[in-house]
């Protein structure tokens, strides 16, 4: 039996809503979590170095 009612929508609408929720989560993590900011800076620095090596 197929679910007709999906609270987050169907198709592309659902993808856009999920993307927006992810954006809000990253925004909150960046604002509130020092460890998240540290790991983000480390990944920005270390990712190009990993390609160079």
Image: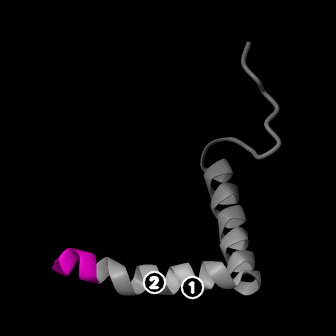
Secondary structure state at the residue bearing disc 1: helix
Residue ID at (53%, 79%): 39
Residue 52 to residue 22: above or below: below
Secondary structure state at the residue bearing disc 2: helix
Query: 53 left or right of 9?
Result: left
Query: 1 left or right of 40?
Result: right
Q: Is residue 52 magenta?
A: yes
Q: Residues within 10 Å of mark 1 (few under 14, many from 20)?
A: few
Which part of the image, by quadrant, shows the C terminus? bottom left
Q: Main secondary structure of the magenta part?
A: helix
Which image quadrant for residue 1?
top right
For the rendered model, the colour scheme is: one colour
Report x, y in % for residue 8.
77, 46
Q: Is residue 51 magenta?
A: yes
Quickly name the residue at label 2: 42
Residue 23 to residue 39: above or below: above
Part of the protein shown in magenta: 49-53
Quickly name the residue at label 1: 38
Between 33 and 26, the one lying in front of the other is 33
**Contact between labelled residues 1 and 2, with CB atoms less than 8 Å apart:** yes
């Amino acid at each position: 039996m197929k679910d007709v009612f999906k609270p987050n929508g169907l198709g592309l609408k659902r993808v856009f809503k999920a993307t927006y929720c992810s954006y809000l989560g990253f925004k909150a993590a960046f604002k509130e979590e020092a460890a998240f900011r540290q790991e983000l800076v480390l990944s920005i620095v270390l990712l190009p170095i990993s390609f160079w090596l």
